[in-house]
Image (spheres, rainbow, N blue to C red):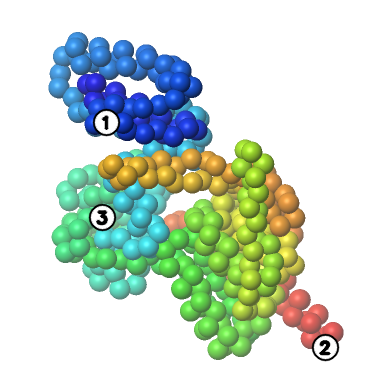
């Protein structure tokens, strides 16, 4: 138990401003100031001592340590600050690479019937090869009943080592059947793109992670081959992702322009710039109340630099940045809110959001029962296309 307390003391000391060093194997050497601060945690040592001497059943010291770390960070009351177990950190790495071992589907908790419903099936993945479709409902995983309440558990079970199998019970309409899929390395589909007119393109970006930049470059090359003159960039329902990726994507459209700046609690600022934009076309950016974080960074950067107009409804308003720290000992880590980010016009949008230049409330029939956009009924998309058509007409008249 003394070893556990020393581990906890070390974890807590890591949050202190001064350095902590190990003088010998079982001794922690700290400054007087740090010692006084650690004295505040004397209650923790007393609780651990009572657990060791009085608790009736066996327990796992590592579980206690993880619980202490989760409680420490959870007590900050910040939804974006939390502890990562080693397994959590492994999943975080998957989001960086955009690859994972699984079935190649995107699922969601369906509020209409509380089922786990397939939203997207990735091309070439195990689920597509097994014949699964969007709107299929997963009611069992390996014989275990699952509902919307068990979404995270179900996803964890469906992921696993490549080459292993998982059996799903699917409800399609009134038909129920089983499929067995072999898990494989899957590359997340970050975006969709298509033409929405003779010279207007549509690109929907789902996340700022994985190989989004590579997929974006491929889509831009395709659009340039098609002679595209304007772009609808759809950032609706995009929760964000990596800030650096938002800067890199902005760099495809902006030349020598400020993308954002960050500011910490000491007032220290860092500015991030786009340097060599390669595609200069009029852009209409679609946003909604679920457009957040890095998606808002990109939308604000394009608008504030005169490259785009925003269409839709006010965005979510996540104007803060998180930093992830890894503990070398076991690969665990923690995420801390560390900075605000500011738009090129020096605005902080946290808990405020970005207001659209053209406000369009989404029509009720623009979303189907599986919460997918219906293109022919998507009045926000139609408004963006009309805005770009008017812009192109003005350019032709001025030429």
| Circle nearer the N terminus (1, 3) | 1
Q: Position of residue 116 (x, y in %)?
A: 34, 50
Marks 1 and 2: which is nearer the front? 1
Camera-side residue of 112 and 395: 395
**Residue 154 x/y as whole percent:** 28, 48
Label of residue 24 in the image: 1
Q: Give the residue number, with chain letter if any, for mark 2.
A: 399
Residue with the most extreme front position:
23
Numbered mark located on residue 58 in the image: none
| Circles 1 and 3 in contact, beta carbons < 8 Å | no
- Describe the element under mark 3 as helix, strand or loop: loop
Where disc 2 sits, the SS reads loop
Give how far apart the Cα atoms at labels 1 and 2 are: 77 Å
Q: CA distance from mark 1 to mark 3?
A: 42 Å
- On the question of residue 317 being in view, the answer is no
Instruction: Name which residue lies at 15% across and 22% down.
Output: 58
Quarter placement of the C terminus = bottom right
Residue located at (25% from left, 71% from top): 129
Tell me the SS state at disc 1.
Answer: strand
Q: Disc 3 to disc 2, how far (Cα)?
A: 56 Å
Q: Which of 163/253 is in front?
A: 253
């Amino acid at each position: 138990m003394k070893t556990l307390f020393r581990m906890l003391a070390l974890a807590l000391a890591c949050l202190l401003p001064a350095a902590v060093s190990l003088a010998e194997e079982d001794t922690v050497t700290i400054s007087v100031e740090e010692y006084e601060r650690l004295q505040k945690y004397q209650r923790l040592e007393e609780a651990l001592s009572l657990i060791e001497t009085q608790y009736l059943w066996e327990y796992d010291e590592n579980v206690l340590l993880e619980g202490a770390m989760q409680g420490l960070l959870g007590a900050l009351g910040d939804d974006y600050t939390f502890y990562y177990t080693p397994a959590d950190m492994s999943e975080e790495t998957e989001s960086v690479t955009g690859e994972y071992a699984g079935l190649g589907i995107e699922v969601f908790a369906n509020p209409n019937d509380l089922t786990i419903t397939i939203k997207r099936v990735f091309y070439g993945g195990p689920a597509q090869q097994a014949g699964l479709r969007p709107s299929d409902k997963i009611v069992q995983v390996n014989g275990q009943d699952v509902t919307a309440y068990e979404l995270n558990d179900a996803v964890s079970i469906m992921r696993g080592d490549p080459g292993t199998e998982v059996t799903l019970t699917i409800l399609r309409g009134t038909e129920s059947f089983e499929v067995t899929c072999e898990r494989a390395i899957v590359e997340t589909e970050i975006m969709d793109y298509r033409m929405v007119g003779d010279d207007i393109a549509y690109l929907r970006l789902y996340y700022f992670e994985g190989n989004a930049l590579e997929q974006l470059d491929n889509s831009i090359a395709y659009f340039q081959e098609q002679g595209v003159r304007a772009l609808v960039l759809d950032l609706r329902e995009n929760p964000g992702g990596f800030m650096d990726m938002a800067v890199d994507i902005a760099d495809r459209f902006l030349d020598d322009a400020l993308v954002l700046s960050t500011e910490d609690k000491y007032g220290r600022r860092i500015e991030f710039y786009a340097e060599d934009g390669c595609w200069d076309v009029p852009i209409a950016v679609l946003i909604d109340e679920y457009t957040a974080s890095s998606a808002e960074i990109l939308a604000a950067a394009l608008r504030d630099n005169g490259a785009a107009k925003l269409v839709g409804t006010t965005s979510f308003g996540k104007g803060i940045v998180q930093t992830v720290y890894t503990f070398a000992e076991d690969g665990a880590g923690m995420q801390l809110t560390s900075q605000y980010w500011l738009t090129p016009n020096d605005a902080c949008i946290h808990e405020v959001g970005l207001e659209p230049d053209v406000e369009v409330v989404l029509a009720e029939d623009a979303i189907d029962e599986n919460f997918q956009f219906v293109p022919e009924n998507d009045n926000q998309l139609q408004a963006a296309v009309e805005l770009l058509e008017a812009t192109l007409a003005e350019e032709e008249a001025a030429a």
